[in-house]
Amino acid sequence: MEAENTMESTKIRLLAAALLHVPFDGWSETTLQAAMRDSGVAAGLARALYPRGGVDLAIAYHQEGDAVLRAKFAVADTTGLRIRERITLAVRLRLEAAEPELVRRASALFALPQHITEGPRLVWGTADAIWTALGDTSRDLNWYTKRATLAAVYAGTVLFWLGDQSEGYADTWAFLDRRIEGVMQFEKTKAGFRENKLGKALIEGPFKFLERIRAPMMRDDLPGRTGTKT
């Protein structure tokens, strides 16, 4: 356990050193080399912690933001907040845990063909972190639809946020409110579909296979599984 803690603290120290260089050199090999020098972490250990260099640093930065979100939401006063307000709060906390220039550099990196799958995977992870923080207990198809719709909201909001010049990101928060309204309308439509006669008939007939879809057993067990309903 002590060795694991030491490795984790070293990983955090190396990432913290890298953040000072990202605005100038991006999430790159140059940044990793500079972080090694600044942190005093040996090259061999740095390579073991971030084997792919800049891209692994960028991933670690994103995941650190998710961890900050979880910690802040856990102590936030959400008493009396409706579900849409709690989702909005969680997304705001996540964006407030990030620096625009660092996110901009990461977006450019993840747009490269060799890293094209990393961005969507991380955004999905953020959506999962938010729904988990909200106490979502769904384990069926709803687990996927909730995260898919929120991932789209989050990705769109990030793009808007990166170009927002309004004071206090007021335009971004207004944009987020509009997108969250879309999510809530989707959830209402989905619930209504299950309750009307046609929806019930389809669910009991052609769409019955959807009942077999299950959420992943573990966070890296995507895209999940099908099986007997329990």
Image (cartoon, rainbow, N blue to C red):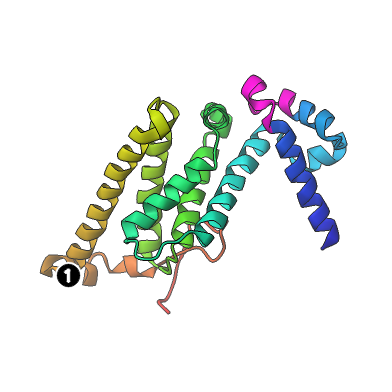
Question: In the rendered view, would you say 85 is above or below 137?
Answer: above
Q: Residue at x 52, y 34 (%)?
A: 116
Circle 1 residue: 195
* Residue 17 coordinates in the image, percent (x, y): 74, 34
Q: Nearer the viewer, residue 20 or 182?
A: 20
Quarter where residue 58 is shown: top right
Residue 157 % position (x, y)? 38, 38
Side of 25 relative to 40 (left or right): left
Image x and y of residue 175, in percent: 31, 38
Could you tell me which residue is drawn at 42 percent across and 34 percent down? Answer: 168
Q: Main secondary structure of the magenta part?
A: helix
Q: Is residue 22 magenta?
A: yes
The image shows a total of numbered marks equal to 1
**What is the three-letter code of the residue carrying label 1?**
Glu
Seen from the viewer's position, the closer of residues 174 and 149 is: 174
**Which residue range is magenta in the image?**
19-31
On screen, residue 141 versus residue 109, left or right, reads left
